[in-house]
Image: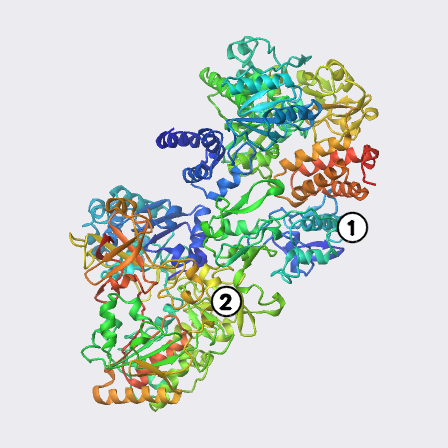
Amino acid sequence: MSKNIFINGKGFSFEGEKTVLEVARENGIYIPSLCYHEKVGPANKCRVCVVEVDGMKDLQTSCSLAAADGMKVGTTTEKVLEAQRMVVNLLLSNGNHNCLSCEANGDCELQDAAYYLGIERPPFVIEEHKEREDSGAFILRDPEKCIQCGRCIEGCNRLVVNEVLDFGYRGGHTEVVWDNDMPLDDSNCVECGECVQMCPVGALIAKKGMGRARRWETKPVRTTCPYCGVGCQLDLHVKDDQIIRVTGTEGAQPNMGHLCVKGRFGYDFIYSDERLTTPLIRENDGFREASWDEALNLVAGKFTQIIEESGPDAIAGVSCARSINEDSYNMQKLFRSVIGTNNIDHCART
Amino acid sequence: MDTTERGTRIQDLIGKYPQKESAVLPVLQLLQKEGGNYLSKEAMEVAARELGCSASRVYGVATYYSMFNTKPVGKYHLQVDTCVPGFLHGADDIAAHISKKLGIEPGETTKDGLFTLSKVQDLGSCATGPVVQVNDRYFENMTAEKTDQLLEALKNGGWPDNDTAMKVVSKCGILLNDRSRKDCRTLALYKKNGGYQALETALSMKPEAIVAEVKAAEVRGRGGAGFPAGTKWSFLPKDDPRPVYLICNADEGEPGTFKDRQIMEFNPHLLIEGIAISAQALNSAKAFIYIRGEFSWIADILETAIGEANQAGYLKHVDIVVHRGAGSYVCGDETAQIESLEGKRGNPRVKPPFPANSGLYGCPTVVNNVETLSSVPYIINNGAAGFKEIGVANNYGPKIFGVSGHVNQPGIFEYPMGTPLQEILEAAGGVKGNLKGVIVGGLSVPILTAEEAKGLNLDYDSCARAGTALGSGGIMVVNDTVSIPELALRTIEFYEHESCGQCAPCRKGTHTIKSKLRDLVMGRGKSDDIDLVLSLCKNIKGLTLCPTGEAFAAPVQAMVAKFRAEFEALVKR
Amino acid sequence: MTNSFREFENNKLIFCIGTNMTEAHPVASYYVKRAVNKGATLIVADPRKHALADKASIFAQIKVGSDVAFLNGIMNVLITEDLYDKKFVEANCEDFEALKAKVLEYPPERASKIARVPADQIREIARTLAVNRPGALCYTLGITEHTCGKNNVMSTANLQMLLGNLGMEGGGVNPLRGQNNVQGACDMGALPNVFHGYQAVTDPAAREKFAKAWNVPSLPDKPGLMIPDMMAKLPSKEVRAFYIFGENLANTDPNIANVEHELSSAEFLVCNDIFMTETTRFAHVIFPSAAWCEDDGTFASSERRVNRVRKIKEPPGQAKPNWWIFKEIAKRMGHEWRSSSSREIWDKEVSPLAAPYTGIKYARIENDGLQWPCPSEEHPGTTFLHKDGKFTRGKGLFQAIEWTPPAEVEDEEYPFVLSTGRRLFHYHSRTQTGRAGMDQKLSEETADICPKDAARLGIANGEYIQVSSRRGSVRVKARVTDQIPLGMVWMAFHFREANANWLTNNVYDPQTKTAEYKACSCKIEKIA
């Protein structure tokens, strides 16, 4: 049964159990939020997504408020904006929220909220310095940008169940810790990068992309991971011909945005200087470069000769379990229809 | 302790709980004790292994609770309570005295490794301040001279006696007993005075009938919120297959409050009987007393009393476990307490779901304050009508008030609900000096000026009408020697220390307000800072996940608004 | 896999045998761990106490190579205690009596002696499996890489049929495939006995169909050679030309010394690759290939899902797509192939020529891939196979299977069992991960041994030791870990130095020709 809620005076229908934030987002209404993530649900921590609801005394967090038929919600009342502005100002009041140098610039939920609320600079500042933590091979931690939303922790414990991250300490000292508050590289962290993908700001950063492109300069290209057989879907964030970073494709089968360390960070072998760039033909103890025509003719000629002399079964081939289907298809087609043998296999059982 | 013995003891602790991870706090407490009052990372790893949870989970818990020393401390850890009641009683002087005497600043340890000095927040000994906690022992009513004696005794390996003297008046004689008797805690004496008759009556009643009686008595929750206990009980789902848990909230941690410990320490069987009756009413086979960790000797008293009651066959229907907290004010919130009891950081949960439907381990749960549960035997013995003969309309029964600060005889007073403030202050020997203001319900309620306090009756409704709250009934009296900006700074320091940190307005708000108030008190503040503090307080009220936001925003806002001139006078010109 | 990854999270029971999922298939393991957190029962059987074992409610630390006996023991309990799914067995299976007769020879006590786990644990597992249905069974190479690999696989199928755990969501026999497209390479007919879509080369109708489609008069009707047989025939020149596409056999096949001998005796070796490898050293011609990201195409994952792979850049230099290379060779041997892109190959050849893929077209897999069988363009794909107990051959055939030990077992001279596998931070011979910064996480091979063996031999964690088998010897760092049982050495094959394949035994399952990577005997010595 379809139900209706009114947001800022306008009616919106929705089906089933939904939160006010979900209904608003589905209808393109922006409510700033920082700790909510659809993969882990409401956290109720940031208190930025508050709205005013007719008949309720206090402001309500839209991420956890169930939308009810006939509910009247205001997302832009002065009371709402004042509370939102205060919280964002508080979050900006310490740390280092410098968009100029931040990798997340253009893809930052705190930046979006501040922009929406018209905050040009934090009205009050309380100095506090925290060191960056650079021990990880692929992940940089910048606690000065952390807003303690807890999404990385939820991701680590509830989604990928690696159980390395948690909150440590209390109150204003609350920090995300790796194991016993260890440097990342000494901890049990496997750098799957789920935390990086969950981070709404620039507190957890994929190192490989640092300084190489602004977020708006890259375009996502969906593809399939080249490593194990799970078939994870990933988005390559590409600028020119360069992969700047990789994220799991949210909502995609089968991985729903999750990746492992290899899928997320193991992509740049394609840019290696050691790539083969020309056909090579053996000469003495080494190889010499050759043209495609020469190399292809040599192979075709040799195959033809062996077929004539010894029959097609004197040729055998191994296909590749790493390359695309279409390559394997053409290789077996070559062996069966051109060479005339079924001597085609690959490492099917290992 | 060798590793096998340690393993056995850890397994024993785990065995007390329906779920393994609930034993995180007791296991860490054991390991800290074993480690010479220090909890090393290695010890935390042992705990994580034994409890089958992640290292970060245990570390997160250990660094959340203030009683865990994750950095080494001296053999004697001197902890001076400088929170508001202590401050009013001169605790700063004691801290300064120790500092001078030992040549160390707070947070430091003497070179010989004997002493570490810390300033701590609220030890729940408000009328007997200044108080110094040494490891797990309290030394109350401290003076410079007694401090010297204490240090001397400790150096020589001894422990001096504690001076617990304060005024005790029980007009009602229901909750407080005669503590001057050596056998005041015994089952024998309790029984002689008619104890456990109510339980016997209750065990012959239908559970619904007990609930109905408590509901009819309209006993309002004594933890501070004043929600009717019987109504809370009636929220439990009917015919639910899940076990029901009863938690007695004994995490008395609001500055100015020290009432529950009076029952637990001197009249433990009253509480146990109250729990036993309530468990019968709620069909709960497992009850917990969540007591603040600092009251370790009181926890021992409760365990002894539970042992006695068990042996006498009073607790066949319910297993009562005493669970020691580890230093967190927020754990006084019922959902934070449930989280803590599940072995987690004491972060309050979002409601709904309410504990009645989904509390401890996701099961139906009732959390009631010590004083509330201790009122239950009287209700059963005398009927709801009998209970309602005490107090005033909508505010029935006896109430324990604690009076600290600037009165001549601070102490503990059991009076009927609705008693005039003036009468209690007189019982406490009258105000010392000129009254400037009074905080009547623990530190979380707005201060009343001397003028506003005139003619106030101490019940929920009268206090609400006066723009404050009865809260826990912890009354702090402030005379005109006190600077309100300094008082406001102490107030916010407490909440900044205690904020669980999970929600942004509280975590960052306490920090910012403290910083601004400190600037003002130090004479480097700006006029804007006063407005900023007021605006933060205004917006934080009602915005946080749990009542803690309100608990600091309301009193700070009242102090600034009502005594603004004092703040203005501090602004740097 | 008969079933799908996303199901795992909501499963009631998951039985993992011979699969180190948290390292080899991390994302699949997330779902298994989430299922456990939601209350699912996890049973893990493995010689190593790896990370997933920590999450298991029952962990059976079975002896390497004991799988058949262990599984027969479980089935013995299911049958003798009358716990199996009689309805399913009667309706959907054949040859139950043969299975019963065989597993009755494996009472838990006997299975216990072979698998070296308590008989009562075998009973507990059987009873747990019986009451928590449906349950999914997952395995990886711990099952297949044995001389009895096929028998191991058949045993897992026996068990799931006996439990009635096939043909529904939450059940199934789920081999987690090691490589991104090993499923696809099989599907595409890179096998000696089938065309793509598993159409037998011995079937005249299939041959006729493909001959027509490929415009050739006839196609060979005799199944071809499998890899080990191809290589064995290189020194004798029975096989004169050998074409290796993208595989680094010199590092990844067992008994490297022998592999290299075979490769070096090839009369004419052609390689397609993206890098020089240990294998290309023996080549006569090397073609430079387009890599991942340099060509459009498809991979088929373990769950039979055909997913798109996209091009974002040109290949370096003159490197070319592999399909183009094969097409060009064909052209030079007199065959003009029409398709001139991956998309054309799939949409015009692969899809129409095999029923399972007929409904899969590039246009349909722009976003999520489709799971075959997908016989028409309206078909949503198949998330689990054998619905309602309908098997491909009709009824599910039970196989009576006898346990056989590994080809080489521990003896006085070589008292340890060597078992091998993959580690999280690297992939196979590191041609890719070694060039993607993963050496920062793991920079050299180790020989994993248990603390008791280490103590007995006076070996410290991190100390270099010598590990030797009848085939070779390597110097390698010892890693002392309680994941490993007494008497075992565990190594991977990611690094050329200290590669486990210098030691592994080149013996094979008689039917599948899968090598026994998981078991050979070895010895370890301190280096003075």
The image position of residue A124, as x and y in percent, is: 73, 48
- Neighbor class of circle 1 (other Cα within 10 Å; few <14, some 14-19, many 20+) is few
Between marks 1 and 2 in the image, the one whose residue lies nearer the viewer: 1
Report the front residue among C416 and B249: C416
Q: Are the residues at dot 1 and dot 2 in contact (C-beta closer than 8 Å)?
A: no
Report the front residue among B465 and C156: B465
- Let me know if marks 1 and 2 both belong to one chain: no
Give the left or right position of residue B475, taking residue B136 as reference. right
Report the front residue among B568 and C338: B568
- Neighbor class of circle 2 (other Cα within 10 Å; few <14, some 14-19, many 20+) is some
Residue identifier under label 1: A78
**Gap between marks 1 and 2 measured at Cα:** 43 Å
Residue C133 in sight here:
no
Whether residue B207 is situated above or below residue B28 in the rendered picture: above
Report the front residue among B549 and A289: A289
User: Which quadrant holds residue A199?
Assistant: bottom right
Label 2 is placed on what type of residue?
Asp
Q: What is the chain identity of the residue bearing mark 2?
A: C
The image position of residue C228, as x and y in percent, is: 24, 71
User: Which quadrant holds residue C120?
Assistant: top left
The image position of residue C85, as x and y in percent, is: 32, 51
Residue identifier under label 2: C368
